[in-house]
Amino acid sequence: MGNRCRLRTAICHGNSRRCGYPGLRAHNPPTFPITQRSRRTYICGVKQPPHCQMTTHKQDAGAQATQMNMLMDIKRGRLSHLSITRCVFNQLLIKSGRALKKMSNTAVGVIPSHVNPDLQEERDRASFNVTELTNIIDGGAEKTLLRKRLEKLIFSDPDFQKFPDIQTFGTNSEFYSATVLKSTKLFKLRRELKWTDEEFDIALRLGGQGHALGLQHGMFIPGLERLATEEQKAKWLTLAKQYKIIGTYAQTEMGHGTYLKGLETTATYDPKTQEFILNTPKISSIKWWPGSLGKSTNHAIVLATLVIKGKKYGMHPFFVQIRSMTDHTPMTGIKVGEIGARMGRMTSDNGYLILNNIRIPRENMLMKNAQVSPDGSFTAKAPNQANYATMVMVRVGLSYYSYQLLSRGVTIGVRYSAVRRQSKLDPKEREPKILEYQTQQYKLFPGLALAYAIFFSSRSLRMKYMEAYQEIKNGNLQKLPELHCESAGMKAFCTDNMLRELEIIRQSCGGHGYLNASGIAMLVTIAAPMVTVEGETTVMYLQVARYLVKRFANASTGQQLDGCTAYLSMDHAAYMCPLMSEDDCRNMSRLCDIYSYRVYMTVSRVAKQLQTDIMNGMPQHFAFNKNLVNLVRAAKAHCYYSVVKDFSKAIQSMQASPQTIKALKTLCCFFAIHGITEESGDFLETESIGLEQLQWIKRLQGTLLAEIRSDAVALVDAFDHHDISLSSAIGSYDGNAYERLFDSAQKDPMNKEEVHPSYFQYLRPFIQEMNKAKL
Amino acid sequence: MGNRCRLRTAICHGNSRRCGYPGLRAHNPPTFPITQRSRRTYICGVKQPPHCQMTTHKQDAGAQATQMNMLMDIKRGRLSHLSITRCVFNQLLIKSGRALKKMSNTAVGVIPSHVNPDLQEERDRASFNVTELTNIIDGGAEKTLLRKRLEKLIFSDPDFQKFPDIQTFGTNSEFYSATVLKSTKLFKLRRELKWTDEEFDIALRLGGQGHALGLQHGMFIPGLERLATEEQKAKWLTLAKQYKIIGTYAQTEMGHGTYLKGLETTATYDPKTQEFILNTPKISSIKWWPGSLGKSTNHAIVLATLVIKGKKYGMHPFFVQIRSMTDHTPMTGIKVGEIGARMGRMTSDNGYLILNNIRIPRENMLMKNAQVSPDGSFTAKAPNQANYATMVMVRVGLSYYSYQLLSRGVTIGVRYSAVRRQSKLDPKEREPKILEYQTQQYKLFPGLALAYAIFFSSRSLRMKYMEAYQEIKNGNLQKLPELHCESAGMKAFCTDNMLRELEIIRQSCGGHGYLNASGIAMLVTIAAPMVTVEGETTVMYLQVARYLVKRFANASTGQQLDGCTAYLSMDHAAYMCPLMSEDDCRNMSRLCDIYSYRVYMTVSRVAKQLQTDIMNGMPQHFAFNKNLVNLVRAAKAHCYYSVVKDFSKAIQSMQASPQTIKALKTLCCFFAIHGITEESGDFLETESIGLEQLQWIKRLQGTLLAEIRSDAVALVDAFDHHDISLSSAIGSYDGNAYERLFDSAQKDPMNKEEVHPSYFQYLRPFIQEMNKAKL
């Protein structure tokens, strides 16, 4: 038997509580069995106050009184999760008078409802009014009120309160269920409270990631609006808007995403029965990735190549019922399911769909833009350019979504850096906040500046889109190519840079940044797909590059360009770096000139190289491929310039106090300066700046880091993310990072049992075997 | 009631199989109920061949015969997972003669045991012998054989075969159980087969991520060896080596990681009872992160500040039993558990530990390096520098581990890019492999080159370490500071760049890279903590920078430096860029000169700035903080130079065929060239190269991309990762990416039920309510 003591100074092969061996025992006999008691208390948390009761014998009178007060507070509902964690933690430490003395900074029985003083100190030093900036971000004080009202409404619902914990700890299946519940609740609220689109959008954002039925408003309804005839809309759009049918938009296939012409699903018209036969010819043709398709939807708009009498007529949309309205089982001939676990939490149940010669009536082709008559003759309107407008809209939306994710991440990173203390700078002082370190600022502030830059730039793009969309609807398509270029570029630029900065911020949180409870780890994995969905980054940049090369060719023929490529008409021969002194480096107009010259030179070089290659006899596609890397480089340069310009313009036209303007100006200048130092090779190579200017710029960068540092917490507070939306133990408003981390760990399913089942299954038998092996 | 038909062309509010509504039905009535049958078949996969039986009526004779053959094959165990997937998929398509014809490239009943022709084509064009390179990587042909032998042994065990699926689909708890089983199996094999350390290391690597008991050999046994007296070793080390006790090393606390002096756990000596009292004074002092601590271990080496009679004596190690040997419950006064879900799969059960005035005998202090006598007097040997050697060893190990992870990632990325086809280059040709695109090469090949660079550089560092360790053990500490610098730098450089390249590779796989089944998504999340564990990147770089600044000061006094900083003694005034023509850019020796001059200039500038700042009256710590960003920059430049040099040297001294040497030389040159273009600003700013040279280098980069492209698959094949180690649907050796993706989805727990429980709980009631709302 292994459970007898062997050696006093060796190992107690038994439970000390039973065998009495003092090899390891508490200073004083514990007043309650920690193992059993504390475990339950931790797990049950706030919902079960009685677990926070403690035995009172052997405790001093002060501690008893404190505990009684806490019990009363629990009954009055005044104790937070956090307080209970502390209360339980304190139980562990209440054992001796000495322990009590040591605990001065986590004082026993004091409810830590206060903000961490390290964080409060930062707020007290802010140079501007945070609420003013919040109002600007929301779009006015009344919009802030509207958001707050919606926050109050939504987060008073226990299901929404619980959501972050399910997101952090639940299985994929549990999380999916929670997102179904969330979607249905939001849909009901929308209908009951007659929310405007704006209100619904705000509500969606507040709830954070995960909407099982997100594609209903995201793609299904807009798809019907865009593609269905009036008659079809009367039938289906109404049902969709009333949530009587739940749908999605099934386009991407396993073997084909970006290149739509490659899609393989077929819709073959059978004039005899006046039906379309929808078919998935091979594995690569399986519809793969559509959101909400895996488990949620009962209908889908399916994109397929139309075939009539053996001839192909391009891609068209078909309205297909995929699951029974009675029991949700797939319709005959349909195989549908989830595509499998993903890197991050599923935002919805992405699915696959196999159509096995499914027949649908002729009337189920969405025929707004093209028609098939009963006898199988095909007619199509001129390609509907308004369709592009929808794609543009989605991309504009993703740019703004990048702001949402990044501003959450940077909130977490900056707040945590203000409460985490580590190492020594001044040997005579205590460990400084890590926010003091220049390297930490260098990790966080580019992300902070980028968040604001994306916000203002995507707001500007949204306004351009709204304007152009009206014109497009009226048949004026003049602005479409530029809008297409700008939205593709912004989508690529924002998602790409946002993801990179989020990962840097995650790393800036040290080890804790790897815990889901930190919130930042989950943001990274949620942001990860954004660079590939709705237009992969490189493909997007190449679309921008194509437009730039075309516009450059126009400019070369003397055409005076306007819009976002006006700079291509510049008199580049007259360019001289406008920075004459270090002071000039704060001049946004001069910085913009430097940026525009950089793009000009980058575009002109690659365009000329392309031309040379082709004139030298290289096939066009070969020449294009040979210059792809430089084309992407040109597109990136263009996008960075656009965003710097938009950010700067937004501040110029802003109605706000001088203090707020000043804080934003500093950030905007840092954004521009940082872009130059990060790609200094490009700026030097194109001779947009010289070596001396680069030295000035680098020096200024150091100065700006220090300037931003004093407003950093205020600048993230201004985003005003609710703690439930943030879902971060280390980035919450009160800054009580360690207590919340500890609290979070107690809720993890791995801590459900004190001893994990695998101990009995594998570990104990193994150790027993090893013990026998010696004998 | 909603389950009656309403409109023919609208929605069937019922199950078509029951209501007979033809709004959506299969072309021919299906020969088996797809929903039920196929679902089960998919889920059960290869283990349950009978599910692959199919009804035979209404099928043509050929299909019947094929299916019979398949059944026979299943019985003979010849059908792979994949085949069954195909077989099931084919059932869906066997319905009509037309479908059969269309399926020519996934021919019915043919077992796809062949390699995807797109991948085979790549292998056929390789310019060198892959096995030769594999042998070089393994360390000789006999080592390759050893690895293969171990692969065969381990992967013939069904538990190891199942492991990747549990990793992809299991809950954290299920995965943890699997890692316990895996650890115990490997420990048993080690003991039974008397594996050498080398064999055990290979076995550990093969098994991939996740070892619940990984810290036993990782930290616990080495810790005892390093810290325990001979007497203590006789007692505990033996038990640990025989796996009679399972342990870990508990150092990091919630509030303190890198800065060890900040650790707060105390060990107070009580001379009366001759015991130490171990205590966790506050929340930030909770031990947090130690691996294997959460659920697995029963013992730990706990690091705590020694306190005797109120005086502190620094950090010392204590041997503490934390769980009962009988039932694994925590010992009295101890609270221990898991720290909560993480971004990626847990490599082990990282845990927390609260010590509530635990008493342990005086003899449980590990006293090799410092002793406390019974009366409480403290004596210590001179600080044991050999301790540093252990830290160095761990960092060297992490550099090599970076190679492991990155080489897996790039294998996945390159193979997938050889079988994925998309868009058009030449309009007359079919969609090209995405590997053809220059932009795709630009995403993959830097990672490929880095994997080889890290491999050779970490191998060289390991050899230096082995050499130095012998000297250190003999009391010669001369090499320690340099070894410390090099290992810190390599740890930072390798983990940081490896993670960045992995993420770029993930993105290069498009949407599928976000699926866990891709393998690459999991690699990213498994690699994510590497940049913070065992020395956070920035902290590591700053240690390198400090060493560089010190050595620069030495060189400034005329000292001739040797070792890794010899270049600081160069006659920098005599430097001229050694590139006289484009051809020179392939000359590794000249490229190395450019790199070393870049470091020299970067170090000298920041060192001089520091000096100036201090001479201008800035406090030293302030000046240091002001220059942190530039110090990190200098350290990075040094590390890149070291790795380029090591890579180049390794090829110079390599015994291999000219073809293999040539392929590696191309890669090495690309690695150096790419480093210059990525940080061209630095090279231009320090005038290591001029604008003309940069143009040559960029042009050469394009050429090298095209050269590497033809050997890319061979270069990743040479890593020779077993499919089970890779655990990737899209990167497997046979290149049947889509079939494996589809197969993988069927195993996802979300597909266990055709209709998810949340439908009954939330979705159906919601839709019903919405339907009533209209009435």
Image: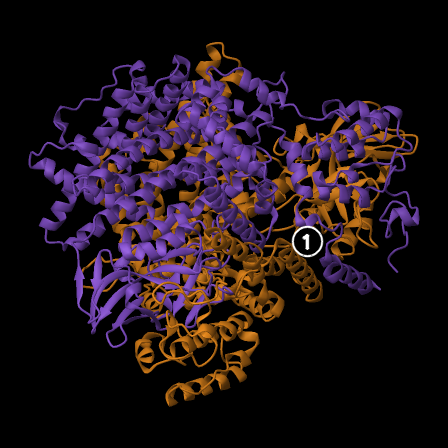
Chain colours: A orange, B purple
Q: Is residue B634 above or below residue B215?
A: above
Q: Which residue is mark 1?
A: A213
Q: Residue at x 38, y 13 (%)?
A: B658
Q: Is residue B99 above or below residue B190?
A: above
Q: Is residue B160 left or right of residue A292?
A: left
Is residue A534 visible in the rendered image? The answer is no
- The x, y position of residue A36, in whole percent, is 52, 73
Q: Which amino acid type is shown beneath numbered disc 1?
A: Leu
In this view, the residue in front, B180 or A480, is B180
> In the structure shown, which secondary structural element does the residue marked by tag 1 occupy?
loop
Q: Residue at x 23, y 69 (%)?
A: B307
Q: Chain of mark 1?
A: A
- The x, y position of residue B388, in whole percent, is 25, 47
Label 1 Cα crowd, 10 Å radius (few <14 / some 14-19 / many 20+):
many
Q: Residue furthest left?
A: B557
- The x, y position of residue A588, in whole percent, is 33, 45
